[in-house]
Image (spheres, helix red, strand yellow):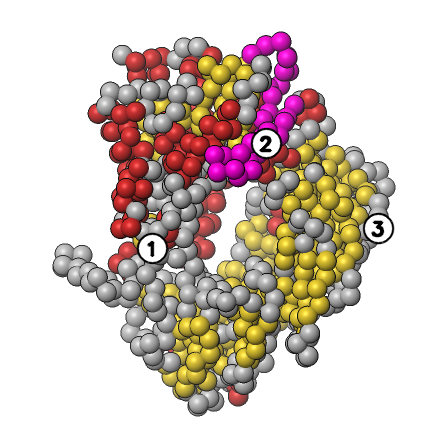
Amino acid sequence: MQTIKLLLLTACILLGAQLYGQSKTIEVPDSLTRHYYNIGYQKISPNGRYVTFNKMYDRSTDTIMVVDRKNPDHIIFERGGVFANTAKFTTYSDLFMREGTNAQILSLPSLNLRIWKDVSDGFYHKVLKQIILLQNDTLKILNEEGDQVRTVARVKSIKNNKDCVYYTVKEAGAYRLTEWNGKSKKVLYTSENAYLDIVHRDALGIFVWDTKEKTGKGELIFKAHRSDVTSLLSSQFLKTIYRAEVSPLANGKYFLQVVIDQPVRNKNAVDVWYGSDPKIEAKFSGDREFKYMIWDPVRKDLSQIDSTEFTQNSFVGNARYLLSFDPYFKHDYTKRFKSFSLYRYDTQLKKYDFMINAGTIAFTDERGKLLLSRRKEGGWFLYNMETLKNRIIHIPDHEMAYFSNDGQFILFEGMSKIYQYSLSDGSIKKISVKDGFTIKVKNGITKDLSPGFSIFRYSYSTAEPVILELYDRENIRNALFTYDGKSVREIIAPTNDDITSLVWEPAHKAFTYVKSNINMPPQLIIKNSKKEELIFASNKTDKEAEGIKSEVISYTNSRGINLKGVLLYPVGFDAGKKYPMVVTIYQKLRYNMNKYLIDGIGMMSPTEGINVRTLLRKGYMVYMPDIVFDERGPGRAAVDCVNNAMDALQGNLAIDFSKVGLVGHSHGGYETNFIATQSNRFAAYVSGSGNSDLVRSYHSFNYNFDRPFYWQYEDGQYEMPGPFTENKGLYADNSPIYHAEKVTEPIMLWTGMEDYNIFWEQTMEFYLGLRRNHKHVTALFYPKEGHSLSKVQNRIDLYSRIYEWLDYHLKNNKQEWIEKMYK
């Protein structure tokens, strides 16, 4: 099954090119320049000798490096501008990669580099063992050494497929969609249009997406392999098809999911909104609708599955039955995840049968035969889609469940243990792993079967060990185990180090991963036995990291909840001096206690607009306390947590408590806004993209989530005890705008003027409220920016201004643009 999204693909390519161009042309000031990096995208060569990986800076991951395991911790090759997903080892352990419009083959160990310029597309095909390049409208097919096997002129496009290559070539005034199997070619389809793509192909025929060059309108066409006759399936629709998915059914039939354009609404006509309307999002994004069809190529019959009740149908892998439901049934937008009643649709008898009230999430096996859903009373329902029989599985309500690909078991994730359920006899095997750790399956095979409705296909292969990733949320520890169907095996013992970029290399029976902490730059490790093999220790010039002092501060809120804060000391810390401090907030930030700190102006935790490493270098202490919410509301609870977090530091003589600033973004921006109205502990505030009026926000439409924002308060991040109508005073009391007159210290606000997550006018509203009450406030409004800033020049401006704002109010460093606020 394949989805065609030509418009989205084009937009992504253009956006990527724009951002790539920005990062290359705009010079970042020395004070904001990145120096340090993380590691990722690692691969081991087939002969096991070489390892390649990419540097991961704050805003780019395009520098590739190669290490020879015979001489570890030494880079034998490094090159910038290489797209990480294009780097592939050949069978002979040479390295193919793409760098901009150049394609390259690095021969190892000779380090001889062959380059092909002006390449618009290209890749290494692992199955064919060939390199495929599109260079100046010429298809070049090379062997693994880079020697030319074949060329084809006037080629419009190429596409990588699992066991072949597709390309479109212009011949005799027509365009031919052609298959290359590594030895010979085969013409699959001919058109007068150049933009051709295969939606689905199997033994019976192909479905082609044929785009008209003049109009840009796409046509869905079927062609049987044994016939030159084509069927124009899109002619059945009066409206333009935007997207199509095809899945094979029994008896040579196919299930088609198509998205078609809705008629353009007259924007000058009145739009009637009813209180009973279950589809509010259609008012904002209702220009397309789903249609579901059954195509019988033998009878050349395209019939529509037409139900006014069950308007959503999903192919789950079953050759006969579809999963059907009403996506708007009892949907009132107050829950984070939609719940639904599931039916099966029999494509042969053309009838619906009720299956289950599925709650908010469901899982299926690879064959689309079994469906698993949580019970409200606890445990799980297991349904057989073919027999409609069900059974209850009495296993605690864990987050995810995976079906084995041999149809024998279901594996349930858990806390401290996992559960294996036998599908044959219903027995349950409880496997203890490690107390205190949340356990996740790392190498499961996942597919979203119905985006937006939490119906998934989750499975695992019994041919390989199940990789179990362990995480201790309380103490921020990591571990790694495997499960072979009988017992668990420890691969990485519980550690306070940060373990990232974990990859299983089945050909070498080895794991690769990156470990680091605040004082240790990232190290790339290979482990295939009990011993770790160091491949590369990064950032060798980073002598600052090992000297960064950190503490974990334990405290409680007034409700007795145990919390932690991460306190970092400035570079070159002198115990005899006092330092200003920046406190940055969101919710629980204890996970930062073991993070290696890279610098720059990229989107890094914990807060947009500041970089922790830069602040430490500038002589600030940095504090990241936990915040949890309760029945008092998120604002009041945040004040309580932060006050107690500050109280826990009172004995620290290194902190100048008269020079402490508070910084937050998004939810942290809201918390900062509210704390500014209630606290006298801070000398200055910085708030980015934060809410001001919870009453207004609750009753607004969120364009990012494409639905009213009720759910975020009643069942989401704000954790309110109930709806606004039952808690009017609570919503108002937790809204910063209702307390604007109480702000006593200067505050800088910022937002993107196309932020439709936390609507940018929330920032303007708080600014106006502060201005009306004659408070010291400065607001930054960035045009054509969203919830986070994407343009490099704007990020430079924002980071520079925040640092200058902090320096002005916490270090007495004068800035003319800030002085204007006080005049």
Between 16 and 625, which is closer to the camera in this rendering? 625
Pick the quarter of the image with the C terminus: top left
Span of residues in magenta: 549-578
In what element is the residue under mark 1? strand
Q: Nearer the viewer, mark 3 or mark 2?
A: 2
Task: Return the x and y of residue 281 as percentages of the image width and height.
Answer: 31, 58
Q: Residue at x 49, y 16 (%)?
A: 657
As measured in the structure, the alpha-carbon distance from the residue carrying label 1 to the one carrying label 2 is 39 Å
Q: Earlier in the sequence, mark 1 or mark 2?
A: 2
Q: Which residue is mark 3?
A: 529
Q: Amino acid at mark 1?
A: Arg
Q: Amino acid at mark 2?
A: Ser
Between 226 and 803, which is closer to the camera in this rendering? 803
* Left or right relative to 20: residue 336: left
Task: Return the x and y of residue 208 as percentages of the image width and height.
Answer: 47, 72
Q: Residue at x 66, y 76 (%)?
A: 426
As measured in the structure, the alpha-carbon distance from the residue carrying label 3 to the one carrying label 2 is 37 Å
- Quadrant of the rendered structure where residue 110 is? top right
Q: Which residue is mark 2?
A: 554
Task: Return the x and y of residue 763 as percentages of the image width and height.
Answer: 31, 34
